[in-house]
Image: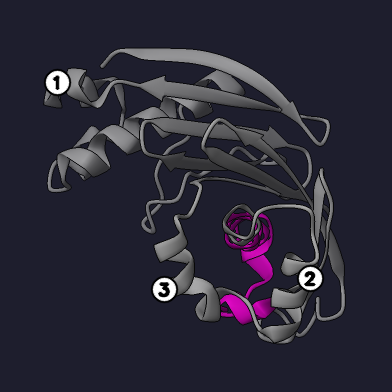
């Protein structure tokens, strides 16, 4: 599979980006992964996205993280990491603290109409509407930021916390502030997390990190 590796900086973290051409993917490419046998029953789309994500992780870590039963990557002791993919792009980041990264294609107006009520409540809606961003971009950021939060702190999360598990309280040109609720983790309820973001062409990238 043809790939291109680049890096970008976000919130003092280096993100490794792998852009790939889906049309060049072959099943034999999976043999590059030690756990390739676990992917043989999955769809070609899932296989190439997984491969691109592990390639990004390889650039970040210098090794391919093994796969857990949940299909999540197993990071070395003392290392926290996160992988995300969207369309023909994959991202990976590692850190000494919990970290979560997410990439999403900007929502269309139709997607916003279909998903708004499941992602944000009325108070969050007001925060997004009062931001300088177009609403589709702001809603995509809200979705992505909550995904990054979950990835960063999934070890503390209740099963299937949902989008009500964090509330948006502020949105600026560089950051989105989330307040964790009981639906995410009673132990973390009331904590605020600053999620950094940036726009890359028609995609948004978010990153959450903390202790």
N-term mark: 3 or 2 = 3
Between the residue at mark 3 and the residue at mark 1, the CA separation in whole angstroms equals 39 Å
Distance in Å between CA atoms under marks 3 and 2: 19 Å
Give the residue drawn at x 69%, y 75%: 125
The answer to whether marks 3 and 1 mark residues whose Cβ atoms lie closer than 8 Å is no
Secondary structure type for disc 1: helix
How was the colour assigned to the protein in this rendering? one colour
**Magenta region's main secondary structure?**
helix
Question: Over which residues does the magenta segment extend?
Answer: 140-166
Q: Nearer the viewer, residue 138 or 13?
A: 138
In front: label 3 or label 1: 3
Provide the residue designation for mark 1: 28
Report the residue at 53% width, 39% height from top.
203
Determine whether the residue tagged by mark 3 lies in a helix, strand or loop: helix
> Could one spot residue 93 in this view of the protein?
yes
In the structure shown, which secondary structural element does the residue marked by tag 2 occupy?
helix
Picture disc at residue 114 = 3
> Is 34 within the magenta?
no
**Residue 204 in which image quadrant:** top right
Query: Residue 127 bears which disc, if any?
Result: 2
- In depth, the one of 58 and 110 nearer the eye is 110
Q: Earlier in the sequence, mark 1 or mark 2?
A: 1
Q: Is residue 203 above or below residue 54?
A: below
Side of 55 where 23 appears, left or right:
left
Q: Can the viewer see residue 160?
A: no
Q: How many marks?
A: 3
Q: Quadrant of the C terminus?
A: bottom right
């Amino acid at each position: 599979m043809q790939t291109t590796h680049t890096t970008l900086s976000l919130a003092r973290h280096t993100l490794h980006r792998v852009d790939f051409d889906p049309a060049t993917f072959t099943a034999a490419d999976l043999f590059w992964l030690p756990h390739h046998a676990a992917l043989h029953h999955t769809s070609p789309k899932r296989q190439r996205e997984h491969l691109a994500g592990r390639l990004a992780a390889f650039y970040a870590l210098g090794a391919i993280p093994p796969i857990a039963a949940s299909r999540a990557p197993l990071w070395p002791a003392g290392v926290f990491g996160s992988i995300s993919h969207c369309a023909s792009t994959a991202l990976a980041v590692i850190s000494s603290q919990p970290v979560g990264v997410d990439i999403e294609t900007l929502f269309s107006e139709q997607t916003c109409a279909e998903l708004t009520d499941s992602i944000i409540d009325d108070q969050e809606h007001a925060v997004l509407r009062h931001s300088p961003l177009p609403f589709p971009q702001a809603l995509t950021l809200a979705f992505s930021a909550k995904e990054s939060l979950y990835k960063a702190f999934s070890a503390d999360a209740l099963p299937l916390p949902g989008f009500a598990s964090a509330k948006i309280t502020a949105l600026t040109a560089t950051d989105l502030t989330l307040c964790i609720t009981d639906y995410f983790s009673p132990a973390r309820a009331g904590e605020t997390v600053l999620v950094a973001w940036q726009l890359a062409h028609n995609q948004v990238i978010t990153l959450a990190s903390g202790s």
